[in-house]
Amino acid sequence: MAFDPPFDSPADTRTSIMRATYDALIEHGYENLTIQRIGDEFPKSKSLIYRHYDGKDDVLVALLEFLLDHLKSQMPQPTTTDAHDCLRNLLDFVLAPDADAERAELTNVMVELRGQSPHNRVFREYFSTNDRTFQRGLVDIVERGIEQGAYRPVDPEPVAEFVLTTMSGATIRQATTEDVTDIAAVRRELDAYVEARLLRAE
Amino acid sequence: MAFDPPFDSPADTRTSIMRATYDALIEHGYENLTIQRIGDEFPKSKSLIYRHYDGKDDVLVALLEFLLDHLKSQMPQPTTTDAHDCLRNLLDFVLAPDADAERAELTNVMVELRGQSPHNRVFREYFSTNDRTFQRGLVDIVERGIEQGAYRPVDPEPVAEFVLTTMSGATIRQATTEDVTDIAAVRRELDAYVEARLLRAE
């Protein structure tokens, strides 16, 4: 499945600052991020960062918003009216067993930002909105599958909640452990769940 | 299900330092943690911290080890030979819908520490070992269930991987979102998975 990194060719100043912040996060991690280090990745004057943002926290909120929008734009859109194909495409994308280095970097940054949420109300709100939107998209797929007669008449909300939770768990475990998380196994078992819970017997 | 907070009555100096670090993390979050702030929560002289640990990173690794051990000790141990009862007890404990404030604090701290893992090799190794141990425990339960004739003859590894991933996802999503994650729904759907995938038809 095609995946575009969040920064291809930086354009305006704000996007360049986002890119510099992202590169500094990949290089140094959240704990060691400073405006100085963002400035080191930024091709223009560091003072421009302060002209556009009220310091590090403000830059990081803007980056979180930017990356969540980017991720949303990367999610497979329904290219088919078949609900089960849509679900499969989404799982293929999120639970890709062979994610490339650029995608792993993006996942790492998102996991580090998410790890700040217990103490950062603004981040928590962004992740809440993000989870809600994602869950809503899954509910839509399940509802369509029921209408199309492919899925059993289940309550779509808990099913969507469960699928989202499994995908989040797999992504976060993979980014925070070393050669431990078996994404392919999670995918196979999630397929078994979908088959038992959603798919009608032929 | 009974849950003991990690610190009841601090005893030796090292445990007091762990408690002070834990309290400082709850108060200030990982990002804003300093030895000064650990010292503020520590009833004795701050110099004692340096006598026992080589600075902040060293204290945090010791705390992570301490908390992972504590969590392991809190996990329900097999009190029954019935494998399915063991699995249910474990799910009741991890996916408790009504976790109290002390437990939520511990979860928040663990999620913040886990969020450092993409950039912290030592943390990543601890979480890898922890996940492996937890997954191993789940494999044992599934294997026993198969031996006892209660579970179908499935491959226990991917099932354990999936259950662990779902539990991690639910815990982390709950700590990083606001009134969004429906733990009870995740539990119900996980039960549906277990029923379809593991339990033999009566």
Image (cartoon, coloured by chain):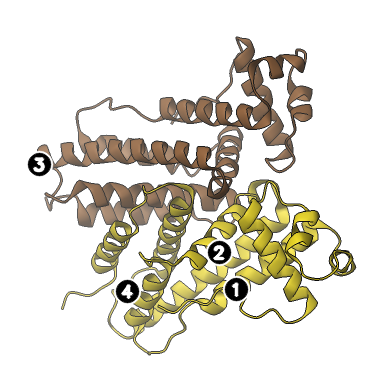
Chain colours: A brown, B yellow
Which element type, helix, strand or loop, lies under badge 4?
loop
**Residue B196, label in figure:** none
Q: Label 2 marks which chain's residue?
A: B
Amino acid on which the number 2 mark rests in the picture: Leu
Q: Nearer the viewer, mark 1 or mark 3?
A: 1
Which element type, helix, strand or loop, lies under badge 2?
helix
Q: Mark 4 points at which residue?
A: B153
Q: How far apart are marks 1 and 2 (CA)?
A: 8 Å
Q: Residue at x 21, y 47 (%)?
A: A156
Asked if the residues shown at circle 3 and circle 2 are in contact, with their CB atoms under 8 angstroms apart, the answer is no
Q: Distance between the residues labelled 4 and 1?
A: 38 Å
Asked if the residues shown at circle 3 and circle 4 are in contact, with their CB atoms under 8 angstroms apart, the answer is no
Q: How crowded is mark 1: few (under 14 residues within 10 Å), some or many (20 or more)?
A: many
**Residue B106, label in figure:** 2
A79 or A125, which lies in front?
A125
Asked if the residues shown at circle 1 and circle 2 are in contact, with their CB atoms under 8 angstroms apart, the answer is yes
Q: Mark 1 points at which residue?
A: B6
Q: How crowded is mark 4: few (under 14 residues within 10 Å), some or many (20 or more)?
A: some
Amino acid on which the number 1 mark rests in the picture: Pro
Q: Which residue is drawn at 61% across and 36% down?
A: A105
